[in-house]
Image (tube, rainbow, N blue to C red):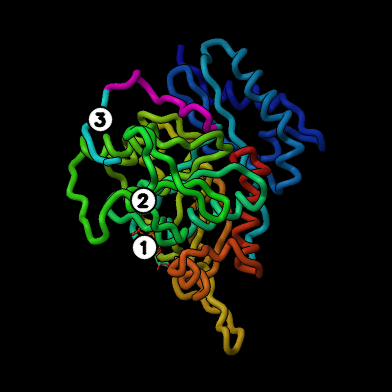
Amino acid sequence: MPIARESVLAVLDRIPLPDGGTLVSRDLIRALTVEGDAVRFVIEAPSAEAARALEPVRAEAERALRALPGVAGVQAVMTAHGPAAPSLKIGQHPTPQAAGPQPIAGIDRIIAIGSGKGGVGKSTVSSNLAVALARQGRKVGLLDADIYGPSQARMMGVNRRPASPDGKTILPPSAHGVTMMSLGLMLKEDEAVIWRGPMLMGALQQLLGQVAWGELDVLLVDLPPGTGDIQLTLCQRTQVTGAIVVSTPQDVALLDARKALDMFRKLKTPVLGLIENMSSYVCPNCGHEAHIFGHGGVAEEARRLDVPFLGELPLDLSIRLAGDEGRPVAAGEGPIAEAYADLARRLVAGGMA
Ligand SMILES: Nc1ncnc2c1ncn2[C@@H]1O[C@H](COP(=O)(O)OP(=O)(O)OP(=O)(O)O)[C@@H](O)[C@H]1O
């Protein structure tokens, strides 16, 4: 018998919160999906502290739902929604692997970072978030899966081709406390990737499986823009904890972001939240704040689609310059680095990183 959404909510409505009410009465459940015998949802805590306090509730919710007749799997992930922030050879056909998404040994969590369209700052957010998480003591990996336009090597300031002593295992470089790997490091400069689906899948499989990632709390995967083969392969073959979608506030970007969200839903990858990049611009001369691409559109969209809003990041020249210099702004000090640190804290508090 199919599991009714109402029965799931009824179970969740019986679990008391430490400070009164329930997950349902306090409206903390987002992105609830019931598919076959699997239940997935996100608990959106109002702050980092609340997320910590709610961890036993999350565990209890999973336990209680598993006891519901017909339920075989439950995945509840937490996200801490805070006040908006101030603002060898790679390339082969895939090899067969066991059916269904597989975990990667030693890696606790895998977060895919996607966007509907290019140029919204997905790679910039990925590198800065990785650095911010590493500064908070997390063991972080960053995989540049943007195979057609790899940019993480430049953004992280790495230009050394990774060693592969046995011709199989790839030893990834580390930069700013982050273990990273990018196809860009294996290609000659100016070399174009002209692979089709199967070759792309093979390359991604190598980057995930042949790289000696070591023990990681979290691996961030910087996806190519859009909804193509790489996204599909990653989510269908690898156990992805969840996805974050980056967008600018413009309508056109949001329209594409919706497609990315829809794709993750179809792939049954929980959406951990949306990030608004290039949200506000403070004139360095007069201090006036302008909203070049609009403002608040992503938060609005998150509300509309019932997915968590993780925060907004400003448009700032220092972000671009730092990326071009290979030293992500999050590695330094100041309000912009703090905005990324805030985002990282929320993910850590929510148990996502
Ligand atoms: N918040 C920001 N403020 C200023 N510049 C930014 C910001 N975010 C990104 N940029 C700049 O915008 C450009 C595009 O960013 P980025 O490469 O991260 O986008 P992307 O979404 O990953 O694009 P693609 O997927 O097409 O590679 C880069 O030059 C980057 O430095």
Q: Which residue is mark 2?
A: 161
Q: Is mark 2 within 8 Å of ligand 1?
A: no
The earlier-in-sequence mark between 1 and 2 is 1
According to the image, label 3 marks what residue?
94
Lower position in the chain sequence, tag 2 or tag 3:
3
In 3D space, how far apart are the residues under numbered discs 1 and 3 (Cα atoms)?
Answer: 29 Å
In the displayed orientation, state which residue is furthest to the front.
165
Q: Residues within 10 Å of mark 3 (few under 14, many from 20)?
A: some
Q: Main secondary structure of the magenta part?
A: loop
Magenta residues, as a range?
A: 96-107
> Of the residues under marks 1 and 3, which one precedes in the sequence?
3
SS type, badge 1:
loop
Question: Residue furthest toward the right?
Answer: 19
Mark 1: give few (<14), some (14-19) or many (20+) Cα within 10 Å. Answer: few
Is 246 placed above or below 112 here? Answer: below
Q: Nearer the viewer, mark 2 or mark 3?
A: 2
Residue 276 rendering spot, x and y as whole percentages: 50, 60
Q: Could you tell me if residue 189 is visible in this image? A: yes
Residue 299 x, y percent position in the rendering: 54, 57
Residue annotated with mark 1: 119
99 part of magenta stretch: yes
Q: Where is residue 251, by image quadrant?
A: bottom left
Query: Does the beta carbon of the residue at mark 1 sit less than 8 Å from ligand 1?
Result: yes
Would residue 348 be counted in the magenta stretch?
no
On the image, the x and y values in percent for residue 108 come to 55, 32
Q: Which mark is residue 264?
A: none
From the viewer's side, name the closer residue of 18 and 341.
341
- Image point (71%, 24%), residue name: 14
Q: Nearer the viewer, residue 194 or 11?
A: 194
Q: CA distance from mark 1 to mark 2?
A: 26 Å
User: At label 2, which amino acid type do we have?
Assistant: Arg
Q: Quadrant of the C terminus?
A: top right
